[in-house]
Image (cartoon, helix red, strand yellow):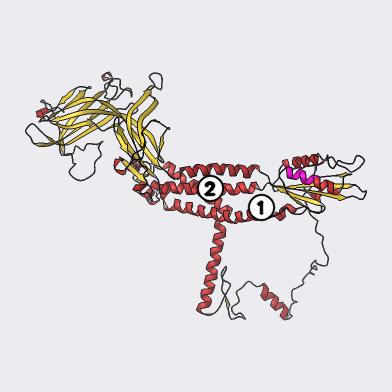
Amino acid sequence: MAKSDSTMDAGGAAGTDDPANAAPEAAPGAGKPAAGTAVEPDDTAASAALSTAPVEDRADGGTAVPGSFGGVRKPGALGAAAWAAREGLGWARWFWRQLTSMRVALILLFLLSLATIPGSLVPQSSVDEVKAQAWKDTHKTLTPIYEKLQLFHVYSSVWFSAIYILLFVSLIGCIIPRTWQFVGQLRGRPPAAPRLLTRMPAHATWRTDAAPEQVLAAAEKVLRRRRFRVERSDTAIASEKGYLREAGNLLFHISLIVLLLAFAAGQLWKSEGGKLIVEGDGFANTLTQYDDFKSGSLFRADDLDPFSFTLDSFSGSYERTGPQKGTPRDYAAHITYSDGSDGTTRKATIKVNEPLETAGSKVYLIGHGYAPMVTFRDGKGDIAFKGPMPALPLDSNVTETTVAKIPDMRDKDGNKVQIGFKGNFVPTLDLKTGTMLSQFPALDNPGLVLTAYKGSLGVDSGVPQSVYQLDVSKMKQYTTKDGSPFAQLLKVGDTMTLPDGAGTLHFDGIKQWATFQVSQKPGDAWALVGAVAALAGLAGSLFIQRRRIWIRALPGTDGRTVVELAGLGRSESARLPEELAGIAAALQPDAPPAADAPDSADPAEPSEGARA
């Protein structure tokens, strides 16, 4: 609690000025020696006591050294070491008090919010390496500066981690003492009623013929029904309510710590990988199965959840007419999956924003495209390659660039040759447009345009290569008899015959493929719990009002009982007078106002008084 409970006892007895305790007024010029007169020894001692200059020689043999916390330094090495220890301990305590203050916690929370801005504006290497590299290639001047500032991996940078850890420590340092203070308040009792209840911000009073004991007994029942904590004395009742306000505040701050821990766990033990799967193919959750994989610093291969699935089929629908022609309306990957190595197989459908949740992991549908199925026979008629050609979409109408590499084949003379195919696959081809770009993403008029190269594919160099790119720097393109580049448009069922009897490529058919992202973040469940608890705690701290109600019943000079009610809230609230009026009205059947009492007040309308 920011303030002590003594602030809620305002309205008690007013202090009185005691002339005996008042300091006598100093006469003008008092305390100043007259010109030419000697200063008395007492004046010298007083002047020395008021001086802030360091005293070189002390009676205890020490020396006052300028500093903040060290105090007097004793002679010798031990004295200097003790002084340095006191100085360091004092600074450490000062730093801890500053770090664990609510002001610094709010500043760190604001800095953490600002620190996330570069992570949203600058491409992050951990999220999209290709996009980050493209940004670096475009901004040659800024890239070295950004790299030194660690802006391409903000959330794992030193400065972001420093703010994160300091905020974590600050919140813990704020919560622990406040929790103990709150426990002490729960064990305490409401303070006794102040002497002058009529000086409270909200109060009411009336006279009744009921006995004081009867009034207090009825008041205690009323307050307990309203869930007040009640402490009764001989002449008054003290009650308090709204302790959950501080509980909500503590819950909110504890939830922030849970969120920070969940975020840290998600970054340290997370794993995220991508996989392209063609219809009919499967996937098992092992490192070797991924096309790309990223993980946290504490992740181990054994942490991967055991599951597998097969892509049975893929379906997609598109807008056929109107200004949104070609816009996807529905993507659905129909799979068969199983948990564990010997789990029961089940059917499921994965859609965009509708991932498959299995074995602690989530499988998201990321992309879609087409895989031309081909069979290549070498010059001897043997099958050198059979399967889907790797293809990547170039535009929203799924125009794809496709590549095939055949590193081990023989020509008609039996010589080993390396051949590569490169071209485009177009799901909806319209030659009237004069381009080889697809006009619609569905398979309305598919076509495969390929050209072929021979030479060195570079696969024997030991340098990793992308299956989606063909390096033709050490290759020569096939040509026709007239010397023009060799290329051919293929429909499903067509065959391309390479010059010089190098081989044939048959366009067998088309299968669809889908790219999936498999994510495992162990902190997601705790993050959800922390977020819900933070909202609940924030609501409690905002809407629950802590207040105290006092009721006193004393015999009056006329023999009737004087009933006084007063209320005090921790913060200004219009509900306090209404609540006090409700308590007064509930007490009225057991303590009705005397009809002939001239100074009786309507208990349903308590008056507003000034603060004491």
Read off the residue under disc 1. Answer: 186
List x then y, in percent, for residue 582.
Answer: 77, 39
Proximity of marks 2 and 1: CB atoms separated by less than 8 Å: no
| Closest to the observer, 479 or 29 | 479
- In the image, is 455 to the left or to the right of 91? left
List x then y, in percent, for residue 292.
Answer: 32, 41
In the image, what residue occupies the spot 56% across and 69% down? 67
List x then y, in percent, for residue 88.
Answer: 52, 67
Please identify the quarter of the rendering in which residue 86 is found: bottom right
Against 233, residue 586 (above or below) is above
Disc marking residue 256: 2
- In the image, is 221 to the left or to the right of 48? right
How far apart marks 2 and 1 lie (CA) works out to: 23 Å
Looking at numbered disc 2 in the image, what kind of residue is underneath it? Leu
Against 60, residue 274 (above or below) is above
Please say whether residue 224 is one of the residues in the magenta stretch.
yes
Against 60, residue 380 (above or below) is above
Against 74, residue 490 (above or below) is above
Looking at numbered disc 1 in the image, what kind of residue is underneath it? Leu
SS for callout 2? helix
Main secondary structure type of the part rendered in magenta:
helix
In the image, what residue occupies the spot 41% across and 31% down? 352
Bounds of the magenta segment: 218-227
N-terminal-most mark, 2 or 1: 1
**Residue 606 in view in this figure:** yes
Please say whether residue 50 is one of the residues in the magenta stretch.
no
